[in-house]
Image: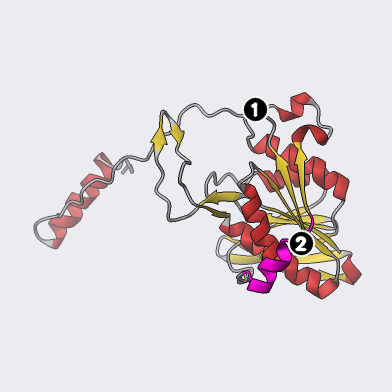
Amino acid sequence: MQIAVLLKMTFDTEEKIKLTAGKIEEDGVKFIINPYDEYAVEEAIRLRDAHGGKVTVISVGPERAAEALRTALAMGADEAVRIEPPAGRTADEAVLAALLFAQLQADKPDLVLGGFFSIDQGGGQVAIRVAARLGIPHVTAITKLEVQGGGEVAVAERDVEGATETLEVRIPALFTAQQGLNEPRYPSLPGIMKAKKKPFRVIAADELGLASTELEAATRTVAVALPPSRQAGKLLQGELDEQVRQLAELLKVHAKLGD
């Protein structure tokens, strides 16, 4: 079974966001594998161990993305591919999906796994766009995944408004991982040493055979701003009935929550 994992490198969750001239400052920032993508890597490795095959991790990003890919190799993935973003262009979700689609179309994996969304952008679009372009079924936010029928069918469970939905789809298919799917392993020292010898390909965007129009961003960033500073709390005075009246008034007038 050939399994591809879509990987993204994001800001460490503990990093403080700084803006310079309307852009997010990246100098000196620590980057990590997108946490939801770690669940996808772990699930891919478990499926390969159970059914055989190969796990390929793929990322679109600059040279620093190699660190995330090598971490995935140290966890147990078999090979990695880093796609260099198109020079001088903005790589939004549409462009990222086009690049990943072109690579996956060539590799033809049986399963594609990715994170539910990335913690930096939070759009949750890329994997779904890839599935649509490949013309394969997709199931998002899964918490359980089983391959059945000799590798022809996958059964997934996903969270839906506090309940669980079970879906059966034919392979090839794409799935995005939600927290609770598994517990990602830490790279071991032997795994780190083995990762240095595993195949690692670097592919330029123009090698993928996409038309120039497919590398044009479908969106543009108008402005980037930090959220407003947190306001000080307000202590309500008086008896309970009076406090309730004050709270209702604050919600109506200041929070604009209506009647």
Query: Is the residue 228 above or below the residue 158 in the image?
Result: above
Classify 10 Å Cα crowding around label 2: few (below 14), some (14-19), many (20 and above). Answer: few
Give amino acid for label 2: Lys
Question: Which residue in the protein does label 2 denote?
Answer: 197
Please provide percent x and percent y for residue 90: 62, 30
Q: Nearer the viewer, residue 197 or 160?
A: 197
Q: Residue 182: image x %, image y %?
A: 63, 71
Q: Earlier in the sequence, mark 1 or mark 2?
A: 1
| Residue 68, percent from left and from top | 63, 55
Residue pointed to by mark 1: 89
Residue 49 - label:
none
Residue at 70% x, 46% y: name it: 128
User: In the picture, residue 172 is in which quadrant?
Assistant: bottom right
Q: In x, y percent, where is residue 31?
A: 53, 51
Given the image, on which type of amino acid does mark 1 rest? Arg
Mark whose residue sits in front, 1 or 2 = 2
Residue 188: say if magenta: yes
Q: Is residue 6 left or right of residue 103?
A: left
Quadrant in which the N terminus is drawn:
bottom right
Secondary structure type for disc 2: loop
